[in-house]
Image: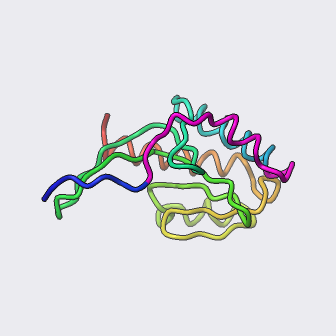
Amino acid sequence: MAKSQNKTQPTAQSVEEYLLTIDDEQKRNDAFKIKEMIERLSGEPAHMWGSSIIGCGTYHYKYESGREGDFMRVGFAPRKANLVLYIMSGFSEYDTLMEKLGKHKTGKSCLYVKRLSDLDESILEEIITHSLAYMAEKYPE
């Protein structure tokens, strides 16, 4: 099967310039804080992925179907309704941490929050750190 590219690819767009376009001051401040957090925890600079996702690090995946590509190891998107954090390992291993996290919702690998002040940031950092370790083991650099 031919290699097909993800729709979401890294771009040269400035992360800082993008974040400065967020109208809601609280969401903008939270987005800058999350950017700094994922850069610090991943040890990688943040890059834009597509037009509205900020991610750090990359990994290459290849499915049994033959589809393969590259994607970020951790990221987030400041959406209108929520801040969406992409926790690539999912949440099945983090039940105890998720109970302590604060007000949130989850999807398969998406963590939806209204504002950082709704969360225990040390728990969020622990979840991100565990996810990055999971990704490093599953997809070594």
- Above or below 81: residue 25: above
Q: Quadrant of the N terminus?
A: bottom left
The question of residue 14 being in magenta is answered with yes
Question: What stretch of residues is rendered in magenta?
Answer: 8-27
Give the residue at x 40% y 39%: 58
The spot of residue 21 in percent (x, y) is 76, 45
Tell whether 100 sits left or right of 50.
right
Q: Quadrant of the C terminus?
A: top left
- Picture quadrant of residue 73: top left
Give the residue at x 40% y 56%: 7
Which color scheme does this rendered protein use? Answer: rainbow
The spot of residue 134 in percent (x, y) is 40, 48
> Quick one: 112 or 69, which is closer to the camera?
69
The spot of residue 68 in percent (x, y) is 25, 52
Farthest residue to the right: give it. 25
The spot of residue 53 in percent (x, y) is 57, 50
Give the residue at x 67% y 51%: 123
> Quick one: 80 or 85, which is closer to the camera?
80
> Quick one: 62 or 141, which is closer to the camera?
62
Give the residue at x 17% y 64%: 65
The question of residue 79 being in magenta is answered with no
Q: How many marks?
A: 0
